[in-house]
Image (cartoon, rainbow, N blue to C red):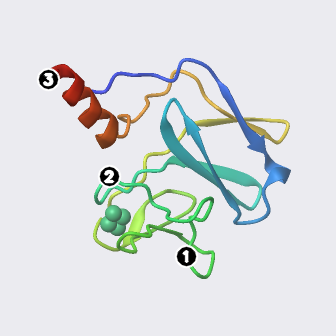
Amino acid sequence: MANNRLLEREIPLCALDDLEERQSIELVVEQRQLFAVRLGNRIHAYWNICPHMGVPLNWVPNKFLDFNNQLIQCSSHGALFQIESGRCIAGPCSGDSLQPVKLRCENHHYYIVANQPLPPAPLNIRAQALSDLEDRE
Ligand code: FES
């Protein structure tokens, strides 16, 4: 089924100086997780979904980079992604890419741009199971 849901409004992300070099942060927008990483004087952001199995990349809050702080790393099976492009350069989804989050920068403050497509909402298995039970009663 196609996902046509768009982000309805612009959302402030952070200022460039809120992050140190190669520091990352995560947040939830419209029930979807995203993360951002500072590289030099730019911030790059991606939806927190590994292209290998569709799960979040990180196990530890706000930790997305590998041991050397050079690449984004998926904690499930170790796929490595370039920070600036989101392209997977090693691992089970090599050649695939993270889905970028479009940002707007104004005076070193970053905003999540409105009207961009949202990825599918994560499946809440527990909520779905409870809903299914209620439907049976
Ligand atoms: S789920 Fe990310 S590498 Fe497998």
Closer mark to the observer between disc 3 and disc 2: 3
Distance of mark 2 from mark 1, alpha carbons?
A: 19 Å
* Displayed quadrant of residue 95: bottom left
Nearest to N terminus: mark 3 or mark 1 = 1
For ligand 1, which image quadrant applies?
bottom left
Residue, far left: 136
Q: Which residue is tagged 2?
A: 54
Q: Residue 23: x, y in percent?
A: 71, 63
Q: Is mark 3 within 8 Å of ligand 1?
A: no
Residue drawn at point x = 79 percent, y = 62 percent: 20
Closer mark to the observer between disc 3 and disc 1: 3
The answer to whether residue 94 is seen in the rendering is no
Q: Which residue is tagged 3?
A: 136
Looking at the rendered structure, which numbered label has been put on residue 66?
Answer: 1
Circle 2 — which element? loop
Looking at the rendered structure, which numbered label has been put on residue 58?
Answer: none
Q: Is mark 2 within 8 Å of ligand 1?
A: yes
Distance of mark 3 from mark 2, alpha carbons?
A: 30 Å
Nearest to N terminus: mark 2 or mark 1 = 2
Q: Amino acid at mark 3?
A: Arg
Residue, far bottom: 68
The answer to whether the residue labelled 2 contacts the one labelled 1, judged by CB atoms less than 8 Å apart, is no
Nearest to N terminus: mark 3 or mark 2 = 2
Check disc 2: other Cα within 10 Å, few if <14, some if 14-19, many if 20+. Answer: few
Check disc 3: other Cα within 10 Å, few if <14, some if 14-19, many if 20+. Answer: few
Q: Quadrant of the N terminus?
A: top left
* Displayed quadrant of residue 137: top left
Q: Residue 97: x, y in percent?
A: 39, 55
Circle 3 — which element? helix
